[in-house]
Image (cartoon, rainbow, N blue to C red):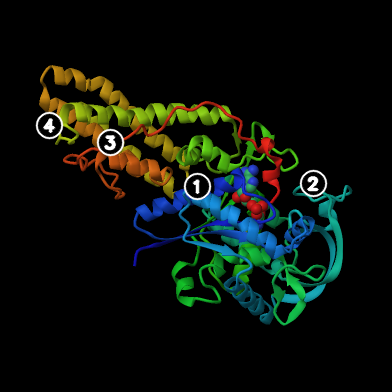
Amino acid sequence: MSQTYYVTTPIYYVNDVPHIGHAYTTVACDVAARFQRLMGRDVMFLTGTDEHGMKIEQAARKNGETPIELANRVVKRFQELWTTLDISHDDFIRTTEKRHEMGVHKLFRQLREQGDIYLGEYEGWYCTPCESFWTETQVGEAINCPDCGRSVDKLKEKSYFFRMSKYAEPLLEHIKTNPGFIQPESRRNEIIRFIESGLRDLSISRTTFDWGIKVPDDPEHVIYVWFDALSNYMTAIGYGSDEEKWQRYWPASAHVVGKDILRFHTVYWPTFLMAAGIELPRQVFAHGWWTVEGKKMSKSLMNAVDPNILVEKFGVDPIRYFLLREVPFGLDGDFSMQALVGRINSDLANDLGNLLSRTSGMMFRYFDGLTPASGPLQEREQALIQATGERMEGYRADMEVMAFNRALMKIWEIVGSLNKYIVETEPWALHKAGKTTELQTSLATTAEGLRVIANAVYPFMPSSSRKILQALGCTLDGDFSFSFAASGCHMEQMPALFSRVEEVPVVQEESPASQTP
Ligand code: ME8
């Protein structure tokens, strides 16, 4: 069996409608999944929704509906958006599903039986928007959540605790001996410092509200939403319900998350797993935070960007491309209309779009649309082929480590070198001068370059990739080598790949109603 690759997005809360931040993580995972499939791996790409917890219960109450009614309604918005964005997930988990509850119970039971979960009393502070417990020192004199700055509630209740303190040392050891576990590097140091400052046992059940998975054999307690949510990565692939699938895909290759929830994924989650004797995921990758036109995206500012509107105005592939090209994966970025329009017009319409239309135009003019075999390669072609090979090697390496913007830059270097090659070889002049062999070489080289580009952009822009391949008369096969496979193929005349665009307002300001979940 081929090597497996299991990648996950966070499961998104259903009290909020999907915005560009959620789309970003999901598109990034989709790019990774599509690339790995193209490389022949057995891929499992998981996304889903986080439907339990106080936050969801409160949002539902505010809307005058039950939590499950809210979840059933909002989950559709996520699922529809993923269809719109051409997301190729293999599974979608909802934490209200039976298979999920079965796995959560299994994990809880095991940890309780072995004494890593015990009953005690919790006294401290709770931040509902973050679903986080905090100590007296952490909330400080202002009594605010150290993460989001909002006010916290005092809690005193009986609670089950997870013996997280016991796993602080083994976790530190794991992080230090596995440098790839937390990416990017800068975030790793932040987590190390957090663990070194000491881990307390974690309260993992609540008795003051109802909306969640009940503690097995003690239904007064509801399992803490993060214990519930994190387990989705196992329950979705059969932990507690489908042993064969579970064995096939675990451990996860990468959990991709926003930097806001890195601590949950690199402290809580691995300690739960260590306690259960389950192998840790190979990597947790924290990407950065998007702002909009320089401002934090938030409901109160009404400036969240609706990906549906973006897609409607600019098309799916340009949006996917922009999100991953604009900002190095791992760093913060700003969503600005000017940057988006600039990228679409210059990188897509001009550079790539024109390369295809020029090539296609000449191929029909001079060869009736049949890509010729190349004549003997001259120094210019050899240099181009070698540079393309090196760039594609770099591309593959970048894709393996989720350096998406670098991978795209390498593709665009190839695009640039092909455009330059056309200008330099002047096929129209070769034609005029009757130099047919050179003309064949020139167009065969350009078409082959485009074939390689189409394969390489596939993970980012699947439908544009297909259109380029269709125009070339070739198929998608993950062959990145410059092998003149395009020669002998019949090109097809196609409309322009990308159109030039102009700036339009897309912030949800226009329709605040669309912001209520
Ligand atoms: O945290 N920029 O769900 P959530 C970039 N249910 N990414 C952003 C973003 C922004 N401005 N805003 C949101 C939860 N995201 C939990 C997760 S996992 C077991 C449970 C993305 O709906 C980013 O991936 O609040 C972030 O981590 C995620 O949405 C948070 O989604």
Q: Number of callouts in the render?
A: 4
Q: How far separated are the C-alphas under marks 2 and 1?
A: 33 Å
Q: Residue at x 20, y 20 (%)?
A: 428
Distance from the alpha carbon under mark 3 to that under mark 4:
17 Å
Location of mark 4 (residue): 376
Left or right of residue 297, residue 98 in this image: left
Q: Give the residue type that dot 3 points to.
A: Gly
Q: Which residue is mark 1?
A: 85
**Which residue is painted at 39% across and 44% down in the image?**
463
Residue under label 2, please give it: 149
Percent across and percent down for residue 423 are 27, 20
**Secondary structure under badge 4?**
loop
Q: Which mark is residue 449?
A: 3
Quote the CA–CA distance across marks 4 and 1.
43 Å
Residue 422 falls left or right of residue 38: left
Q: Of discs 3 and 4, which sits in the foreground?
A: 3
> Residue 196 placed where, x, y %?
69, 56
